[in-house]
Image (tube, rainbow, N blue to C red):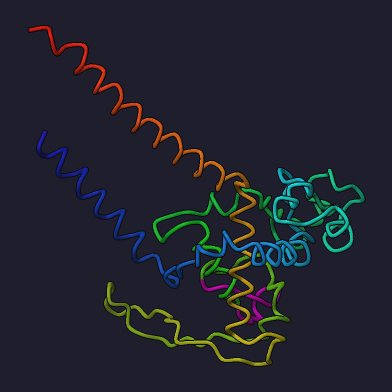
Amino acid sequence: MKKILALLLTALVSLTAAHANQGGPAWDKFPTEKVNDMAALQNGAKLFVNYCLNCHQASFMRYTRLRDLGLTDVQIKQNLLFATDKVGETMKVSLDPKQAKAWFGTVPPDLTLVARSRAGHGGTGSDYLYTYLRQFYRDDSRPTGWNNLVFPNVGMPHVLWELQGERTAKFVEKEDPHEHGKKVQEFEGFEQLTPGTLTEAQFNDSIADLVAYMQWMSEPVQQDRVRIGVGVMLFLLVFTFIAWRLNAAYWKDIK
């Protein structure tokens, strides 16, 4: 029995080490306060519709939900309704899956729940998206001309490159610390080739807005759920106190 437990423990440690050493940058912390910022969420919705909704879709999300962000039907129709004519429709695209697979190597995934599904050992799904969307660089060896440090050889191009500008990644060859005689490529930094329309700080802030919207989209009633949950816990706390005092009053004359 001890040997079995030891083997299981060794396997767990090895798996953890493998995750820790699988390469790629550590995930940056997403600024969670953005999820409660209506202006940030509205800007994120605009970025999502303009840059993400061309290839990806959010088939479980209706445009009418954007009313919860303080937008009117007129604002939605004029600024965010490009893939359909009705505000009550879901966020689908007309991209043919067969063409998408031929162009990108795979069908672009639905993004409705991506902010929840991408959580892992490195952090939350929002942390992953916030890091991933800021780690693109030029790579002429790739079919799209772009690559990504977080998701090497990704089929997705850098759709936000006009905002961030073009840059290339610099790698240096170093000795593999885990295997003698083996060389590995280690990331050294980015080199900006052309400037974007936004500064680095502005681009990071825009990506945070976009990720905030994607997190909100994955569960639009999250804030209501938290508020109701707090109320329920307070009710149970008060009810527990009342039940405790009633129990004491009921049994006080019984020995």
- Residue at the right extreme, as displayed: 85
> Residue visible at 72% across and 62% down?
48
Residue that sits furthest to the left in the current view: 255
Q: For the C terminus, which image quadrant?
A: top left
Which quadrant would residue 95 be assigned to in this image?
A: bottom right
Looking at the image, residue 10 lies above or below residue 230 = below
Quick check: 224 above or below 181? Answer: above
**Where does residue 167 sit, x and y in percent of width and height?**
62, 87
Q: Is residue 190 left or right of residue 238?
A: right
Q: Is residue 44 above or below residue 253?
A: below
> Which quadrant holds residue 27?
bottom left
In the picture, the quarter occupied by the N terminus is top left
Task: Judge from the rendering whether residue 129 lies leftward or rightward of residue 87; answer left or right.
Answer: left
Q: Which residues are magenta?
A: 137-149
Which residue is found at the position 63% from the left and 47% from the top? 220
Taking the magenta stretch, the answer to whether it contains residue 144 is yes
Spot occupied by residue 245 in the image (x, y as percentages of width and height): 24, 23
Q: How many marks?
A: 0
Residue 7 image offset from top left, x and y in percent: 18, 44
Front residue of this view, candidates 127 and 68 = 68
Q: In the picture, residue 234 is in which quadrant?
A: top left
Q: Main secondary structure of the magenta part?
A: loop
Residue 210 part of the magenta-drawn span: no
State the residue lying farthest toward the top: 254
The residue at 41%/61% (across/down) is 122
Report x, y in % for residue 55: 77, 59
